[in-house]
Image: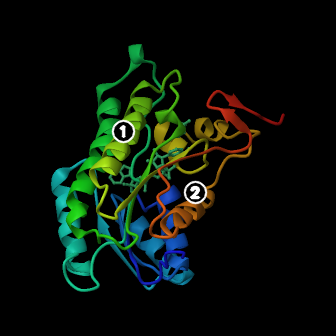
Amino acid sequence: MRTDLKGKWILITGASSGFGAAAARAFGAEGSRLLLGARRQERLEQVAVEALKAGAAEAHVHRLDVSQTTSVEAFMAWATTRIGPASSAGAGLDVLLNNAGGAQGLDTVAQGKDADWEAMIQSNVLGVLRMTRAALPLIRKDCGSSIINIGSVAGHVAYEGGAAYCAAKAGELQITRALRLELNGTGIRVSTIDPGLAETEFSLVRFKGDATRAKQVYAGTHPLTAEDIAEILVWVASRPSHVNIDELLVKPVDQAAVHKVYRRS
Ligand code: NDP
Ligand code: 8X3
């Protein structure tokens, strides 16, 4: 039987744009209760309004920087006051969506900047570890709860200029695999969803606000949208409670491989 997401608590990191914001709207449409985190609070508030409009039972926002342990702990303390500990009847977190992250720059290793490397490892790798460690005591056992991490094709295949980002997403993949083993027997499901080319703010962030360069990444091709991924995230979380989608690689039809993208002239 499909896991009903109505009234379930869904915690989404990186909910201020892209996949995270679309996921807030999509889980909202299921009637879920949402806890949304990111650094840009105004954007989060806007997303919460959209999620409520879509049907969310509740939507709450709090500033979160996954690269800071103190921020993660403050966020989870706030989340606990909203949800209540997993031990109390009917309480607990149903879905942790570790989505916050992204790329900084497209430099070769020879040209790489420490600040970019550190930011990518902090958000994509350590952020997932910190959030999961802090959220685990809140996650309900044996009832179809899920930890869903957002990886990337970059975690499977390297490309020039992607060394640190590819390393970070390969790290996320191995964290997911380790967690899947560690949580076996708890009933908590663990998944990684690994998208290819998707048009969000990802490239704008990677190219430090250079909108022209960011647009070129998607020129002439038909990329994934944030909504495509959000729909998959809802599907993963709503599988029957005994079904675990371990690893899902999702690419646009136009992207046969990381380097082979079909572009219409
Ligand atoms: P966006 O740039 O649109 O969204 C990234 C989100 O992550 C924002 O909400 C941002 O919020 C948040 N974020 C970044 N750093 C931090 C941080 N330190 N603490 C808290 N939140 C943070 O890009 P996407 O939606 O595309 O990216 C979402 C995830 O998907 C990322 O992990 C990315 O690596 C991955 N991905 C993206 C693909 C793509 O082609 N778009 C493909 C494969 C994977 P704020 O800045 O407000 O903190
Ligand atoms: C984002 C996809 O190919 O730009 O993770 O690294 S890619």
Q: Position of residue 176 (x, y in %)?
A: 37, 46
**Total numbered labels:** 2
Q: Is residue 169 left or right of residue 125?
A: right
Q: How much space separates mark 1 and mark 2, taking CA atoms?
A: 21 Å
Quick one: SS at disc 2? helix
The quarter of the picture where the C terminus appears is: top right
Q: How is the image coloured?
A: rainbow
Residue shown at 15%/55% (left/top)?
Answer: 70
Looking at marks 1 and 2 on the same chain, the residue that comes earlier in the sequence is marked by 1
The quarter of the picture where the N terminus appears is: bottom right
Foreground mark, 1 or 2, reads: 1
Residue 112, numbered circle: none
Q: Look at the image and tell me whether residue 121 can be seen.
A: yes
10 Å crowding of disc 1: few (<14), some (14-19), many (20+): some
In terms of image quarters, where does ligand 2 lie?
A: top right
Residue shown at 47%/27% (left/top)?
Answer: 162
The relative height of residue 156 versus residue 246 in the rendered view (above or below) is above
Q: Look at the image and tell me whether residue 12 can be seen.
A: no
Q: Amino acid at mark 1?
A: Gln
Front-most of 13 and 245? 245
Residue shown at 37%/41% (left/top)?
Answer: 172
Residue 229, numbered circle: 2
Q: Is ligand 1 within 8 Å of the beta carbon of the residue shown at mark 2?
A: yes
10 Å crowding of disc 2: few (<14), some (14-19), many (20+): many
Residue 174, numbered circle: 1
Q: Amino acid at mark 2?
A: Ile
Front-most of 230 and 61? 230
Residue shown at 24%/86% (left/top)?
Answer: 89
Q: Position of residue 91 (x, y in %)?
A: 27, 81
Q: Position of residue 246 (x, y in %)?
A: 47, 50
